[in-house]
Image (cartoon, grey):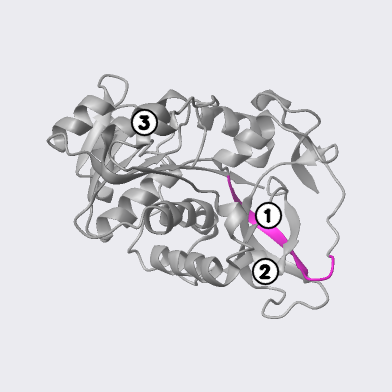
Amino acid sequence: MKAAVIYETGGPEVLRHEEVPEPECPDGCVVVDAEAISVEGGDLLARAAGELPAVPHIVGYLSAGTVREVGAGVEGRAVGDRVVALNAAGSHAARRAVPAAMTWPIPAELDAARAACVPVTFGTAYECLFTAGSLAEGQTVLIHAGAGGVGMAAIQLAKRAGATVIATASSDEKLKRLKALGLDHGINYATDSFVERTNQLTDSRGVDIVIDSIGGQNLVDSVAVLGYRGTLVSVGVAARAGSALEARSLWARNNTLRGVYLGGAILPEYARIHPMISDMLQRVASGELHVEIDRSFPLAEAAAAHAYLESRRAFGRVILTP
């Protein structure tokens, strides 16, 4: 079968489209024929840096398709089932083997491309807002990178929970399009200071929750827009830079810094998180929540897909198709 593999970490150019062995189906696993592969921010980080478990290595968290083989001991999954599959690696391929417990049935009304985009983005947004941030009706949220996958999901979930939603993006055009998802106030970070603008919008009271997927100085600066007992949620490092955040900067307003990593919570809290993601899939299938797909690339052009996503030109998700 064909897959996008790497032999070393680096830029998008390290991805190669090659023939690789067919996956085996261990006990407790299923093999899924991919119809759509969602390119996640974590995929970019895994390709860019870190230790490779073996070479060639197939990167990628999420894909959606049809079960073609079921391993011993698996219950609730059968050949022919349409599922979304999540695992630490292996999505950038025509098929993959994953633990059956890390799959979700795709609702009949939902296509594979949109289904593949749901678990990580909507699951992460939910964890940031409600588990880490304890969002309540009437509160105000600042969402950085509002035009990204987690950002778009968070805008929708926060608005439906009765919050006032502020978000940053790289252009006025993106912010205008985000209005349809529930955005109340947009900040173009290319031209405006989000600290100054957020404090203007809140009459210097600050916001209850900040969701930061950028990291670096952006995370540090976000402390300045937190209201009393506000929560800063760190959920990514798109800037690929460390943050010299002083703990005492949180003291004056009794603020909280929380970290969210969905992958680290799924197994310890499986009984809560697995059905939460199922609920997100149902809500997207019903039309209550929306998945915006910006572009689709063939798997053979995985390097171009990664480069496009890293360019920050995308509005929404980027998909690969085998």
Which span of residues is magenta-colored?
Answer: 26-38
> From the viewer's perspective, is 168 left or right of 148?
left
> From the viewer's perspective, is 65 left or right of 186?
right
Q: What residue is shown at x 23% (from left), y 54% (from top)?
A: 163
Residue 101 shows which numbered tag? 2
Q: Nearer the viewer, residue 316 or 221?
A: 221
Q: Residue furthest left?
A: 203
* Circle nearer the N terminus (3, 1): 1
Q: Is residue 274 above or below residue 33?
A: below
Between the C-alphas of marks 3 and 2, the distance is 41 Å
Q: What residue is shown at x 42% (from left), y 58% (from top)?
A: 131
Q: Residue furthest top?
A: 191
Q: Position of residue 5 (x, y in %)?
A: 76, 37
Instruction: State the residue position of label 3.
Output: 249
Q: Position of residue 35 (x, y in %)?
A: 62, 55
Q: Position of residue 263 (x, y in %)?
A: 60, 53
Instruction: State the residue position of label 1.
Output: 87
Name the amino acid type tagged 1.
Asn
Q: What residue is shown at x 50% (from left), y 71% (from top)?
A: 107
